Amino acid sequence: MQRRSFLKYTTTSLAGACLLPAALTAKTDWHTYKDLVIGHGTHRYKIDMNWGALDARYYPVNDCHEMVQDRQGRIILLTNHTKNNVIVYDKKGRLLEVWGTEYPGAHGLTLSEEGGEEFLYICDNNRHEVIKTTMKGQVVQVYSYPKSTGKYQKIEEFIPTESAVAPNGDVYVADGYGAQYITQYSQDGKVLNIFGGRGEGDQYFDNAHGIALETRFDEPSLLITARQRNQVKRFTLDGTLQKVIDLPGANICRPVIHGDHLYFATLVSRSSGNTPSGFVCILNEKDELVSAPGANKPTYKDGDLQESYQTLKVFQHPHDVCIDEDENLYVAQWNSGKTYPIKLLRID
């Protein structure tokens, strides 16, 4: 583990990031969006395109996959660039520290508080496993492919994209780029259950990309995305389907819960194919889409949500959203010119 505090670099390096050309900071066109307000209803935002921009010669990113906030208020970014897989910011976008060089397929990032201590769970596509670490990067536990279930013949078939941790410490892993199963592990790595998989029925998945513990209601449950189907599905902790929520046109990534609301980064608009056309989705406690920053205004007809699509070229391929205590949003992007995250400042 090579953990590197940013203080080891000279203050000149950090200050110089403000003076570098756009090609080095990987931030462009921020003037275009400086005073623009996006979103709808009670969830509207001003855009900060330059939040977290660093000197890419020292702190490069590749795909900015996911972000979480710890109890100290720090914003933690996961990227699959092995010069520094984990970049830690304060809320103003100032660099605090970087660590991690051994996660070439870094994709999913989950923060869990266990026994008063915080831990990170990193899903690595290339390593075909989930790695639990301390907040300083020390490895605590590795969750490998669930060979004992008979669902996988070789480790390469298991390509985990996200994890969620239940109140009892069990770990649920979504195999979003592999066979589409959801595997339940004990905290020490024993396989307890497996459900889902690829298929056509509602209990099955097509790109089970994200998973999160649903904490807004009386009984905890699981929210799991079926990205290619523009759906999020609610399951009991033992894998029984409870509800399917349709989000037409939105290829959504993982669910993120904050207060009574549910947030998704939307990788692309379905009608646009794979071209850069993403946005953000915000649902209320009734699972209704109430705001879509970067997209058309949510519209329901006869109780059915109409298709969402990008209307402003603010985002390219949003892959995750992090919400702070002031309800500002931080949006990490995949395949978007190695850009740093975008901050959306809540105004309503």
Image (tube, helix red, strand yellow):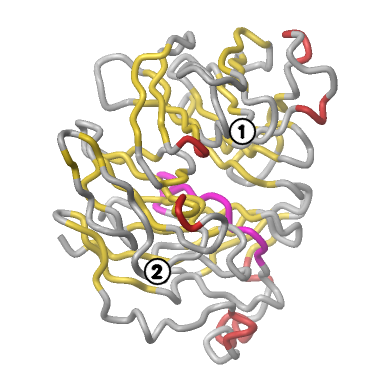
Mark 2 secondary-structure assignment:
loop
Is residue 348 rendered to the left or right of residue 158? left
Observer-nearest of 10 and 24: 24
Q: Is residue 291 above or below residue 222?
A: below
Counting from the top left corner in percent of width and height, residue 66 is at 53, 49
Q: Which mark is residue 3?
A: none
Observer-nearest of 302 and 39: 302
Q: Residue at x 67, y 11 (%)?
A: 191
Q: Which mark is residue 176?
A: 1
Observer-nearest of 277 and 147: 277
Q: Which mark is residue 92?
A: 2
How busy is the neighbourhood of tag 1: few (under 14 within 10 Å), some, or many (20 plus)? many
Q: Is residue 260 visible?
A: no
Q: Is residue 237 above or below residue 217?
A: above
Mark 1 secondary-structure assignment:
loop
Is residue 255 rendered to the left or right of residue 274? left
Q: Is 113 within the magenta?
A: no
Q: Residue at x 62, y 15 (%)?
A: 185
Name the kind of residue labelled 2 in the image: Lys
* Segment tinted magenta in the rendering: 61-73
Q: Is residue 30 above or below residue 308?
A: below
Q: Earlier in the sequence, mark 1 or mark 2?
A: 2
Could you give the CA–CA distance between mark 1 and mark 2, rounded to whole angstroms?
33 Å
How busy is the neighbourhood of tag 2: few (under 14 within 10 Å), some, or many (20 plus)? few
Q: Is residue 340 visible?
A: yes
